[in-house]
Amino acid sequence: MDKRSLRVAVIDMNNGAPNQGMRGIQEILSRFRTENNINLTFDIFDLRQKGQIPGIDYDAYISSGGPGSPIESKGEKWENDFFNLLDQVENFNSANEEKKYAFLICHSFQLACRKYNLGNVTERRSNAFGIFPITLTNDGEQDEIFDGITNPFYSVDSRDWQVIEPNLDAFNAKGAKLLAIEKERKHVDLERCMMSIRFTEEIIGTQFHPEADPIGMKMYLLQDEKKKAIVDTHGEAKYFDMLNSLDDPDRIVLTQSVILPNFLNKAIGNLQEA
């Protein structure tokens, strides 16, 4: 790969809450820079806590997950700023050959689904936390963001909210594509939630955490309240299966090494073409 510059804005949606996601995103960016020998720089914007929002002068944007309701923030300035940034990215892309790219994770994904009216954003009956299989749709199997992944693949899922009941009219009007859905649970009569959507050719989002790595996940799983929640919901055997699977190269190690790097490859590739 030719040595080129790639400027990335990382939007922190954690509102000051402790998390491993921001560390995971930064590690992926640093590793991508080294492995591809490119001049990649990134800046972090604490949006929810400090009201920081990047301008349109970055090549790519990665917006993190975060705690709390993706509905109660409706009308707040930070949310309006976030939605305005997405509009700016789309407007720039419609007018220029060189494109801007955005990747939206978990809370950011839920906000975007609400913005574009692509589904019903609703609170789950219980918290989902752990390493779970995720199923690619036909569109997902063809999408370059998942090139190199298995179907199903495994990723970290951590959420109290979900997006269900896809609005097909809104999908068609926007040209959006549903790329992945929640695993099928034959013994549970509940709607499978949407796990990944390509909102536009340049904006994509995931409900799951593609930045999660074994180190961060192990720190979570060893917390007493997390262990209790998983054991109470899924049983002790499932809890220890999660712990033992952390270093499995075909599970979250694979997911972390494929999805966000594919996104960055697309962004740097577009710059080289332009």
Image (cartoon, rainbow, N blue to C red):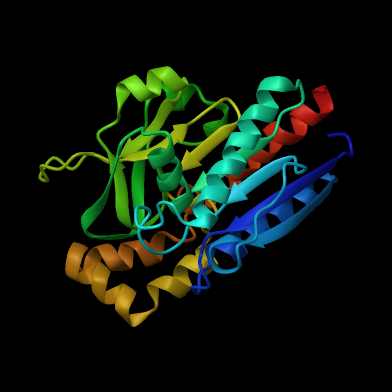
In the picture shown, does residue 190 fall above or below 23? above
Query: Foreground: 111 or 239?
Result: 111
Pinpoint residue 154: horizontal percent, then vertical percent: 41, 47
161 to the left or right of 55: left
Q: Is residue 205 left or right of residue 236?
A: right
Taking the view exactly as shown, the residue that stands out farthest to the bottom is 224
Q: Is residue 254 visible?
A: no
Considering every residue shown, the one lying at the far right of the view is 3
Using the rendered view, name the quadrant where residue 124 is placed.
Answer: bottom left
Q: Is residue 50 visible in the rendered structure shown here?
A: yes
Q: Quadrant of the N terminus?
A: top right
Give the total of numbered labels: 0
Q: Is residue 61 above or below residue 216?
A: above
Which residue occupies the foreground of this view, 238 or 155?
155
Q: Would you place residue 212 above or below residue 35 in this image?
A: below
Residue at 50% across, 74% down: 18
Q: Is residue 24 above or below residue 132?
A: below
Give coordinates of residue 193: x percent, y percent.
28, 41
Q: x and y percent of residue 72 in the render? A: 35, 57
Residue at 54 percent across and 56 percent down: it is 78
Q: Is residue 252 left or right of residue 201?
A: left
Q: Between 263 and 42, which is closer to the camera in this rendering?
A: 42
What residue is drawn where x is 52% and y is 33%? 146
Residue 23's quadrant in the figure?
Answer: bottom right
Quadrant where the C terminus sits is top right
Q: Residue at x 51, y 65 (%)?
A: 14
In the image, taking residue 163 as reference, residue 214 lies left or right, namely right
In x, y percent, where is residue 189? 10, 42
